[in-house]
Amino acid sequence: MSLTKKIIIALILGVIAGIGLTFAPEAIFTGLDMYLLGPVGEIFINLIMMLVVPLVFVSITLGTAGVGDPAKLGKIGVYTVSFFLITTAVAICIGFGVGYLLEPGKEGVFNTEAATYEAQEAPPVMETLINIIPDNPIASLASGDMLQIIAFAIFIGIALAHLGEKTVGIYRLFEQANEILNWLVNLVMKMAPYGAFALIASAIGTAGLDALGSMAMYMIAVILGLIFHGAFTYSLAIWSLGKANPLKFYKAFFPAMSVAFSTSSSNATLPVSMKTAQEQLGVKKEISSFVQPLGATINMDGTAIMQAVATVLISQVYAIPLDFSDLLMVVLTATLASIGTAGVPGVGMIMLAMVLGQVGLPVEGIALIIGVDRLLDMLRTSLNVTGDATIAYIISEKDKRDELKVKHS
Ligand code: ASP
């Protein structure tokens, strides 16, 4: 049986087991979660997280050295960041669209009196931008600071390209390290069906179904927004700019989406999403290894959609209407907030606190949606990684076409 099939079966069984567990006595669920589901899920996440930092470092260094020309690298960088910003802004508008259409804050009973939420600070954007250049790259590697690792790897890559023959030994070393890491990604992926099953059963069992009641409309709005962005924005981009069939794209990329779904972390999904993009979608290695790690950190369209819908919900529940300039402010802050926060579970809530603060909505409103956030996090992370792969694919295809043109002229 193919890995994709195994993962699909695991996802379905995980959802069924999770729902079943919400009906089981509390002690049974707690025991199972503590001794079986929790450990299996965590071992799986640790196994892939173990590969993230070395893989990102090695592959970006090789990718940069492969491109060689800093001007070309700059061009890819400008394309990448522009695509990231545009798709995120579109995602937020879609979120507003479904939010105002379905009015999730008007349905159900919301107890705002009891709502309390301790907001965590998101790092200021300027600070994030300045800190992209690490003063201690070893510390960046140790703490897994993705933007700093990317910056350091790009510098090493440029140096390797520049020094050519002189550093061929190190270049070979990086190539061989890359082989080892890719081999390990394959190995870890064999665990994916078991990990996915455990993570999903545990997430659904923990969130429970009671929380869903009054939040159903909010969840439906977010899910519709996610589906619309995937089925419309990305499909259109894949078809018109990538000149490919979106259905084939989604089918090939499914294993990565399912890992994102079960881990709720774009960062943890990186090894799988890069491998899938390179091997199944034919994205050029040097482009995939640059665009996807960057995207895991700064491009989160699914998260942006959740933020837009949540903003609308909270403004409706607290009866604080937003005018057009507030909405523009949300687009701006949500897009910028995503730059400074890493792709890990639940980070969308930290960004949301910043967005709400900017437009004068009560941050306590987050308490209303936190109960269902774990489940939505799974879905939006799948869209987040798909967005990164879509952009990597489009840029890679454009690069291939440009190369062909140069060859023929
Ligand atoms: N979990 C998401 C990710 O890693 C971020 C979020 O929305 O919380 O992409």
Image (tube, rainbow, N blue to C red):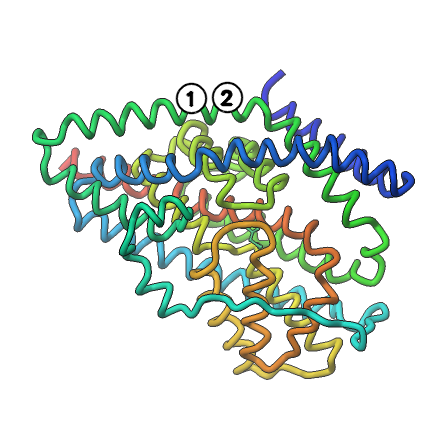
Amino acid type, label 2:
Leu
x then y, percent, for residue 167: 12, 31
In this view of the protein, which residue sits in the foreground, 5 or 371? 371
**Which residue in the protein does label 2 denote?**
187
Amino acid type, label 1:
Trp
**Which residue in the protein does label 1 denote?**
183
x then y, percent, for residue 118: 64, 69
Which structural element holds mark 2?
A: helix
- Horizontally, is 351 left or right of 242 in the view? right
**Image quarter for residue 222?**
bottom right
The quarter of the image holding the C terminus is top left
Q: Is residue 123 above or below residue 208?
A: below
Instruction: Tell me the crowding category of disc 2: few under 14, some 14 to 19, or many 20 or more residues within 10 angstroms, Cα based.
Output: few
Residue at the spot 50% in from the left edge and 62% down from the top edge = 90
x then y, percent, for residue 134: 29, 55
Residue at the spot 54% in from the left edge and 60% down from the top edge = 91
Pointer 1 residue Cβ closer than 8 Å to ligand 1: no
Q: Is residue 6 above or below residue 44?
A: above
Which structural element holds mark 1?
A: helix
Kindly report the distance in space between the C-alpha atoms of the residues bearing marks 2 and 1: 6 Å
Tell me if label 2 and label 1 are in contact, CB under 8 Å. Answer: yes
- Horizontally, is 43 left or right of 51 in the view? right
Residue at the spot 57% in from the left edge and 80% down from the top edge = 359
Instruction: Tell me the crowding category of disc 1: few under 14, some 14 to 19, or many 20 or more residues within 10 angstroms, Cα based.
Output: few
Q: Is residue 372 above or below residue 402?
A: below
